[in-house]
Image: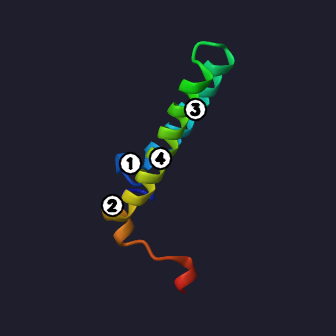
Amino acid sequence: MQGGMCKCPHHKMAPFFLVLIGVVFLLKALNYVTAGAADVIWGVLVMCIGFQKMARGMCKCYMNHTCACAK
């Protein structure tokens, strides 16, 4: 961690997946993607966000992080 900002690339993944979900809904609204395909795609992207959140515990920058509720 440098200057209060972590350099781990996985911290940028959740916002990236949220943008992709928005793109999927936009493509669905513009009829570029069928409703069934959009349902599958956004479901997979939500699962990716969950997996990314679970992997966060393996990050070196979180090992030194103290929870405010533990104080």
Q: Which residue is mark 4?
A: 47
Can residue 23 be spotted in the picture? Answer: no
Q: Nearer the viewer, mark 1 or mark 3?
A: 3
Which residue lies at the image location 36% right of the left edge and 72% below the top edge?
A: 64
Question: Circle 3 sits in a helix, a strand or a loop, which is it?
Answer: helix
Q: Pick whichever of labels 4 and 1 is earlier in the sequence.
A: 1
Q: Which residue is mark 2?
A: 59
Q: Pick whichever of labels 4 and 3 is earlier in the sequence.
A: 3
Are the residues flagged by discs 2 and 1 in contact, CB closer than 8 Å?
yes
Where does the image place residue 10, in percent across and percent down from the top left? 38, 48
User: Mark 2, residues whose alpha carbon is within 10 Å: few (<14), some, or many (≥20)?
Assistant: few
Q: Is residue 65 left or right of residue 31?
A: left
The outermost residue toward the front is 36
Q: Pick whichever of labels 4 and 2 is earlier in the sequence.
A: 4
User: Mark 1, residues whose alpha carbon is within 10 Å: few (<14), some, or many (≥20)?
Assistant: some
Q: Which residue is mark 1?
A: 10
Q: Nearer the viewer, mark 3 or mark 2?
A: 3
Q: Nearer the viewer, mark 4 or mark 1?
A: 4
Where does the image place residue 4, in percent across and percent down from the top left? 45, 59
Give the spatial CA distance, label 2 vs label 1. 9 Å
Which residue lies at the image location 32% right of the left edge and 63% below the top edge?
A: 58
Dot 1 amino acid type:
His
Give the spatial CA distance, label 4 vs label 3. 12 Å
Give the spatial CA distance, label 3 vs label 2. 31 Å
Q: Which residue is mark 3?
A: 39
Q: Which residue is at the front of the view, 43 or 68?
A: 43
Q: Nearer the viewer, mark 4 or mark 2?
A: 4
Dot 2 amino acid type:
Cys
Residue 48 in which image quadrant: top left
Dot 4 amino acid type:
Met
